[in-house]
Amino acid sequence: MNNILKSINPSSGELIGEVKITSQDEINEKVANARAAFNQWKLVPLNERVGIITRAFEALAPRQRDLAKLMSMEMGKSGGRSMGEVSGVIHNAEYISGNVALSLRPTKKSARTEIQYLPLGIAAVIAPWNYPLAMAANLIIPSLVAGNTVIFKPSEETPIVADEMVAALNEHLPENILQIVHGSKDVGQMVVESDVNVIAFTGSQKAGKDIMKRASSGLKRLIMELGGNDPLIVMRNADIDAAARFAVGSSFENSGQMCVSTERVYVDDKVADMFEARVKAMANNHKAGPWDDREASIGPLINDNQFQKVNHHISDAIGKGAKLLVGNVAQKSPYIEPTVISGITPNMLLESEETFGPVVAIARYANIEEAISRANDSEYGLGAVVFGAQGAL
């Protein structure tokens, strides 16, 4: 059995590095170590925990550039975006820690009643590849501040940058309060079924449902952020330039690989021509390319499976009558050129499913009730945006 996980640059196919896949025995050992560490960590006063965690993340600052480059190489986002993500992780640590600490203070309800907040034990953090450090830190920091210990499983697409971050943090954290495991779906399943107390997961609905099933036998607590298919409604009295900028920016950010990106746009018939013209002009200013191409604003998709999915959604829409305003039906992996499509309908995959690519998918509506109905006709959650003047309804 191959026990090595390889990290591949999605732009070039170049091997970036390798990590050892964590075995079942190693997971059990790490969980046992986390349990022993928890018995000590939970006794550390809350304010001291905040200080320890904040200092550990602030100590990442000298490695910011190296971490950002690794991130760009592993998942393809531009150097500037990667620097911004690492910087955010470092500078937000104090803010997140402080706010978590405030929420954990005992609450006096009456002369005889006080609510106290106690740590649960071991938190399994399973984080995605699209924001590999930020999404991980947003789950790791609150878990540690609350007095839990953490078993962290990063995505198999971005193991190297996650490994580097954890190694750097552990130079300043008590032993075994933060440990990392590596592997694909099967390793995540083993972690979920291990002796952990709470599972914090960000990822797909399919994976979330599997985690719920596996966690149910142990009545483990779950914190999950799953996929999205976020709608944008543009009303006839909206600021069309602002709405178009938002549609393009939100759809193309991180190559569209963002769970709260705009996936479908519903625009009033009366302003649709103007809106589409603005979107088309703005989209034509974008270019796809590798992370170190300074002219490129859209990077590669993370892997060929994701490329094939996005390409299929585009082809499905064109085949069912949608109009391609910007882009190309014949795309070449790993890049999806900036794409704008008009005339999407509910039977198209661009409207009914999460696409996760740099596509502005536009539909026209005759009345606001229709727009609201179509916006709500989705099994996904997360976000929604409306552009319109105050009192427009």
Image: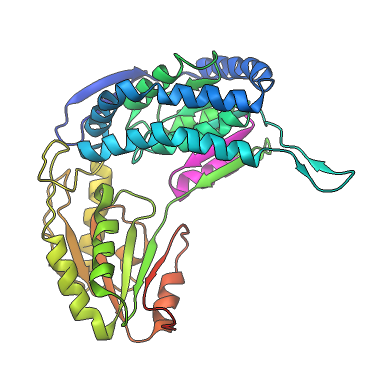
User: Vertically, is 100 above or below 67?
Assistant: below
Tell me if residue 212 is in the magenta stretch.
yes
Side (left or right) of 162 relative to 199: left
User: Vertically, is 387 above or below 228?
Assistant: below
Tell me if residue 303 is in the magenta stretch.
no
Report if residue 44 is visible in the image.
Answer: yes
Side (left or right) of 12 relative to 186: left
Q: In the image shown, does 152 or 47 lie closer to the viewer?
A: 47
Report the residue that reaches farthest toward the right.
112
Q: Residue at x 31, y 56 (%)?
A: 355
- Give the image location of residue 58, x and y in percent: 41, 25
| Res. 302 image quadrant | top left
- Give the image location of residue 288, x and y in percent: 13, 48
Report if residue 126 is visible in the image.
Answer: no
Side (left or right) of 32 relative to 74: right
| Res. 260 image quadrant | bottom left
| Res. 17 image quadrant | top left
Magenta highlight range: 196-213
Q: Residue at x 43, y 26 (%)?
A: 57
- Give the image location of residue 11, x and y in percent: 16, 36
Q: Residue at x 31, y 52 (%)?
A: 356
Name the quarter where the C terminus is drawn: bottom left
- Give the image location of residue 159, x and y in percent: 35, 26
Way the structure is coloured: rainbow
Name the quarter where the N terminus is drawn: top left
Q: Residue at x 23, y 42 (%)?
A: 304
Q: In the image shown, does 208 or 43 lie closer to the viewer?
A: 43
